[in-house]
Every structure is written in C-alpha cells, then in structure tokens.
Amino acid sequence: MERRELLRMLASAGALPLLAPLARAAGTSDDWQTQFEAAGAAWKAGFATPEGDFPLTRATVRGHFPDAVAGTLFRIGPAGHDLGGERYHHWFDGDGMVHRFVIEGSDVRHQGRYVATPKRVAETKAGRRLFEAFGTMPPGVETPTSADSINVANTSVLPLRGEVLALWEGGSATRVDALTLDTLGVKTWRADLAGMPFSAHPKVDPDGTVWNFGVSSGQGLLALYEIAPEGALRRAAVVPVADMPMVHDFAVTKRHLVFLLPPLVYDGKRKEAGASFLDAHVWRPELGMRALVIDKRNWERRQMLALPAGFLFHVGNAWEEDTPRGTQIHVDYVRSDNADSVFISNREVMRARRVKTTEPHLTVATLNLSTERATQATLAQEAEFPRIDPRRVGLRHRQVVHATQIRRDLPGFGAIARTDVETGRSQRFSYGAQAMVEEHVFVPDGSKPGWVLGTAFDFGRQKTMLSCFAADNLAAGPVAQATLPYALPLGLHGAFVPA
Ligand SMILES: [Fe+2]
C-alpha cells in the first residue's frame, strides 16, 4: 500500500463509527440499578461500583511470597458501573480501575485508582452518563467526538518502559504512572496514528518486540503495529478484512501474526439504527471461524484458512513448525459454540443475574499453511483467561494456566488450573464454594517450575485475595496468600513486573 493511501485510510479510521446515537430520551432511566440493589446474591459485590479510589493499604499475609514474585502485579477491569442512578447494562462498559499489588515477602500492599480518562472526568463532573458504551446506550447521550471521547481504559495493561498502558480495544492506550497510578494521557505512537484503536492483548516476543492490532469496524480495517523493545513504533499499517468481526485477542509465532475471526460481524446499518457497538454485531455462523495468518515481515503476505464456526475472546499461544506435510501453526484458544456469553451472561451480571450460556473450552487448532487446511481439537477443560510462561510467547509451549470450574449458581469460575495442551493432562486448585476466580499469571523463576499468581473474590467474607502457587503443584494450594480488608470489583487482566 502506498504511504499516502495508508495515511488517508488511517485518518478516516476511527475505531467506532461516530454516528448520532438514538438512545432512550433523557429522564427515562430504567430499573437495572434497582434490580441490582434489590438482588440478594453475595457475589454481586464483584460487580458493584467502588465510590472512589483505594489508597495504598497493607494486606494480611499468610505464608511468604517467593523471591521470584517480588515485584508488582498490575491489574485492571471495569469498575465504574453506575453513575447518577443509571447502571450500565454490560460488564465491559464500566470505567476502568487500575490496581497495583506490591509484593515483597510477607508484605503486600494494594492501591487502586480509576483511570482518569476524558470520558470519566467529563461524566463525573456532569454527574451523569454523557456517552454511549460498548453494550449500553444510556438516555440522552451525546454523539462522541472521537473514539477516545468514549474510551474507558478498562481491559488490560501493558507495562512498557516504566509506565503502564491501560488498554481498551476501541481507541488509544492510556498512559498511567507505574508508581502513583496517576493518569498521564493517551499514548500516541506516531502523530498520524492519533486515536487509532490499539487492542488490549498485545504480544511481546521473547526479544521484547511488541506486536498489536486494532479493529476499525466501520471501515473494515485491521490496523497492525510493531513496536521496538525500547518502546518506539517500528511499523504500522492497515489491512482490509471482509465481514469484519469482533476480534479481542490474537497470537504471534516466530514468523506470523495469527488472528482467529469469529463470525460475529459488524453491521453498520444496525449502528445507524441506534444499536450499541455490541448490538451492531450479528452472529453469522455460515461464515465459519476464519483464521487470518499474516507474515510478520511482509504484511502484504496473508492467508485465510477455515475452521468450524465458534466464538472466542482469548488466545493462549501459537507456535509453528516445518513438517514434511508443510508449515504448521498450532494455536490454542478458548472456544465457545456461540457468542451468547458476550450478549447475555456478561450483561445479566449487571443486574446480579446468573444466566448460563455455552461453556468455553480450551481448543487447539492446527493451521497448515502449505495445504491451507485447518483442523482443531477441543480439550475437556472449561477455561477462560489463558496465560502462558511469557518466555514462550510464539514458541512451542505446553502449559497453559487458566480459570476453570464453571458453577451453576455463580457467574465466572471457581478454580485455577494448569493444563498441558499436548496431553490434555490438567491440575487444579478450587477456591471453594464462596469464591470467584480472576485471571492468574505465570511468573517464571529461572530454570525452576515457576509460580502462578492471581486474585480471587471471597464473597463469603467480601474480601479480595492474592494467592501464589507453585506452578507444578497447584493442588497443594497457595504457598502464600494476601487478603485485603475489602472487596475489589472483579477485573479482567493483569501483568506482573519483577522488582
Ligand atoms: Fe481479554
């Protein structure tokens, strides 16, 4: 693509089409807030709105956190779910709150702060919602002036050169000070890329190179980014994708970028008719799951392979090998039969309702780039929030750490597991009947088996816990556990930075 043409496309490629929303008229506030407040479920505190920031607070610690996990676990998630009597209708809508858990032996301190995005600042000042959200059109909202005017910075974090980037897939990353959690403003990788979508699951190669993408739904464009280990943008471009779906995560191998495209396709006409961004998407299983493979060095070299229809948020890892049958990519991901979780269960939690939808399972797909044939096998494990050893990104790996154990009476998961994606063997630790598990990360420890570190919400005690497990013996339970004197809103993703 000519550079001039690229710039023209980028300039017109905001993440979200900026149409005048046809929201409910102001003053017609619905009753989700009332329903949430009236619900009796103890777990609903995981979806409540903290009144303000959490100042640095010392946790009660049992055991001793190993030296390898001395450092900071950053986490983020939607937290500002309601404002002015109006409650969002989707878990993913809320204003982001970023957390840091500072870990040193038997001392653990926690701090949490709302990300002061322009949207949050304006709405807090107004005392009401001013803009549309991912899955909600609040009454009387204004037309957004840019994708970043509705950026909630609530999905994931990328530590980079002493800062933490708070990520949201519809717009720019937001810079946050790693020590104070002060919001420093949006990250602009290059002047002509200002406001471009920068997704929430960048991948970091073992050499430190950062790869990421962004979806411009209205324009049917996939933006690609390559960032040097020192944080400078090396390359960015956009490639067209027909029937652009919702894409939340991707994978890298040594030589390729791998996108699994679920058949949840953006329809601009629905947006024009007043739908939220989520509800502008249509489930079109006849398209199947497409696997788009792009050469890392030459983004013009692309292949599209076909898999059976399915939905995913998250990819674990991918790696490639040259075999007598051709070049094969192995990619593991968390597959559901359909997208009901994003449309139904992740919505209903906002009025404290548990609705069971199709269960996600770890699935391993094999993409043969020579024959352009793809196959997949689903493992037995229910799963979400897959994480791997960060040293194995894009390389052959076997172990995936993930949440598991879906319960009938609660949303989310009750146990943490580590599964070998080649043998299907799995070990787990269940947090018990009164807890909801959040994402756990793998922390390497030289040539030793390493550690698994993550948070869970003990709704029996209404407290959030941070636990550390020996990665090769999850079943033995935590080697150390820190309990906060309060509950945090359930979050999405995190990243560990060693001291
Ligand atoms: Fe995610």
Image (cartoon, rainbow, N blue to C red):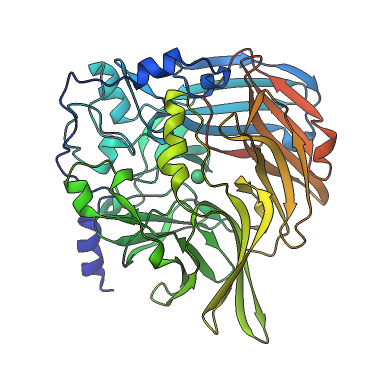
Question: Residue 492 location in percent, x, y?
Answer: 52, 36
Q: Is residue 104 visible?
A: yes
Number of marks in picture: 0
Q: Is residue 15 left or right of residue 179?
A: left
Quadrant assignment, res 49: top left
Q: Is residue 402 left or right of residue 163?
A: right
Q: Residue at the location (30% across, 23% down)?
A: 121
- Quadrant (top left/top right/bottom left/bottom right) for the C terminus: top right
Left or right of 359 on screen, residue 58: right
Foreground pick, 36 / 165: 36
Q: Position of residue 408 (x, y in %)?
A: 61, 33
Residue in the image at 14% along x and 40% along y = 20
358 in relation to 10, above or below = above
Q: Residue at x 82, y 30 (%)?
A: 479
* Side of 143 relative to 485 (left or right): left
Q: Position of residue 91 (x, y in %)?
A: 43, 32
- Outermost residue on the bottom side: it is 324
Image vertical order of residue 61 relative to residue 471, above or below: above
The percent position of residue 306, horizontal first and vertical second, equals 48, 72
Residue under the point 82% across and 38% down: 475
Q: Is residue 295 visible?
A: no
Q: Quadrant of residue 94?
A: top left
> 437 or 66: which is nearer to us?
437
- Choose between 53 and 130: the one closer to the eye: 130
Q: Quadrant of the N terminus?
A: bottom left
